[in-house]
Amino acid sequence: MLFPSPIFLFFFLPLTLALAYFTKQSKYRNIVLVILSLLFYIFGEADFVIMLLGSVIVNYFLGKWVDKCRNKTAIVAGITVNLLFLAANKYLGFITENVNVILQLFHWHTLKVINVKLPVGISFYTFHSISYLMDVYRKENKAQKSFTQLALYITLFPQLVAGPIIRYKDIASQFTGRILTSIRFKIGIERFIIGLGKKVIIANTLGISTDLLFSIHPSQLSAASAWFAIICYTLQLYFDFSGYSDMAIGLAKMLGFDFMENFNFPYLSSSVREFWRRWHISLSNWFRNYLYIPLGGNRVGNVRVYLNLFIVFFLTGLWHGASWNFVIWGMLHGLFMVIERLGFDKVLEKSGRVVQHIYTLFVVIIAWVFFRIENFSDAFSFIKTLFGIGNTGGYTVNFFITKENVIILIIAIILAVNGVNYILKGIVRLTYRAIASVDILNAFFRNIKSVSLSLIFIYTVLNVVYGTYNPFIYFRF
């Protein structure tokens, strides 16, 4: 079930909020939320709900075992069970295909490739399960005695199918100690509307142009068309995923939970290292806390640090999809993380902010080519087209530019670089000089905010009801 869908907005969400607010005791409220979260999952992936429940049950008992033993055998076994579960459902076909390549080199019999349908959200809820086991092993939390509370942590619908990836220790106390208030509800609904607008108005509009452009072979595009395509995709991806994260954070707030932020204007980054402190923050934190630091982090020699970075980004790419193009995407980021650590960061510091931003955006945008295009030949052909190499032409950018997508593109760029904040600061300075009253100024901006959010909500709802194009990129992960 997608958040920007009529059944969610007009049936599931009102039902959930009504039951959550009318159920007074946290014990029963948790049970209600678990049932509703399972219904949310069943609506989109009924075939795999037993698998989801199986994961909860297995990790419930694994957590008790890890808590009791407190040894490496228990935690390694627990992590292995979860990774095997993930591999069997996400990577079995990928592994078999690559093993067959090796077998064919020696003219040996190949294995039968078994293509398993990917359960929605499996990467996210498996990482939640591992987080729980690791936090128990590190004595940051006791094993959860309540099956309902652990089930709620793993299945809570705002983050079930696409994150953010919330660490167990960060949310454990909220299962019993959360308070539902009108102020939290107001903040939550405002955040949800902002995310809804990002997804429906910006990401979906840019997605139409992106899909059209990438459906054409790169050799048939002009350099300008290729740049228009990858810039649209760069912004679509950000607003698609950050919009979903905003909706998830807003929904959680309405239900009394506090989720961590997942994006912090990543396209303002001045280095690749900074980009990963701003992009998909929950995933970056997960890999840092549960992989990079256990591997030695920065406490080991330089060669080991570089190796650790490559391991982390290899797995970051593989986490996104069972395909080598995602691995290449991850390794490109890992390569530039190492390059910056080798001393290039010092060069960047002396080059000025403009050069730093250009460098970072260049690396990020080129890497997105591999994220989008699975076929390596087509990906390299697209990069050649970007730089006017080879046979380019056919479709010029004029074929794809419309008044609507240009307006949305400009708005997207302004929002992506936090331009609204600077605009508002300028308005405040000008308005305060004229009014010279903080109370009037605050009331003015409250009214502007309320009207703007109302218009965004009405417009997005109309798009959801009457529109047909509503993909979500991260559902496949």
Image (spheres, rainbow, N blue to C red):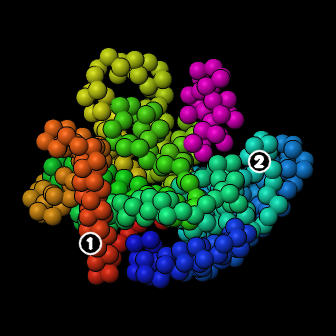
Kindly identify which residue carries mark 1. 459
Q: Mark 2 is on which residue type? A: Asn
- Image position of 431 with respect to 449: above or below: above
Residue found at the far left of this picture: 398
Residue 190: give x, y in percent of width and height: 39, 61
Callout 1 environment at 10 Å: few (<14), some (14 to 19), or many (20+)? some
Residue in view at x 81 percent, y 50 percent: 142
Q: Residue 290 — which label?
A: none
Residue 292: image quadrant is top right
Question: Are the residues flagged by discs 2 and 1 in contact, CB closer than 8 Å?
Answer: no
- Give x and y (percent) for residue 346: 40, 17
Quarter of the rendering containing residue 407: bottom left
Q: Is residue 347 left or right of residue 180?
A: left
Report whether 379 appears left or right of 41.
Answer: left
- Marks 2 and 1, how far apart in space? 44 Å
**Left or right: where 87 falls relative to 200:** right
Q: Secondary structure at mark 2?
A: loop
Looking at the image, tell me whether mark 2 or mark 1 is earlier in sequence order.
Answer: 2
Residue numbers of the magenta segment? 285-309
Q: Residue at x 66, y 42 (%)?
A: 290
Residue 141 is marked as 2
* Residue 348 on image: x %, y %: 35, 22
* Circle 1 SS class: helix
Is residue 199 at all visible to an observer of this figure? no
Picture layout, residue 100 above or below residue 421: below
- 122 falls in the magenta region: no
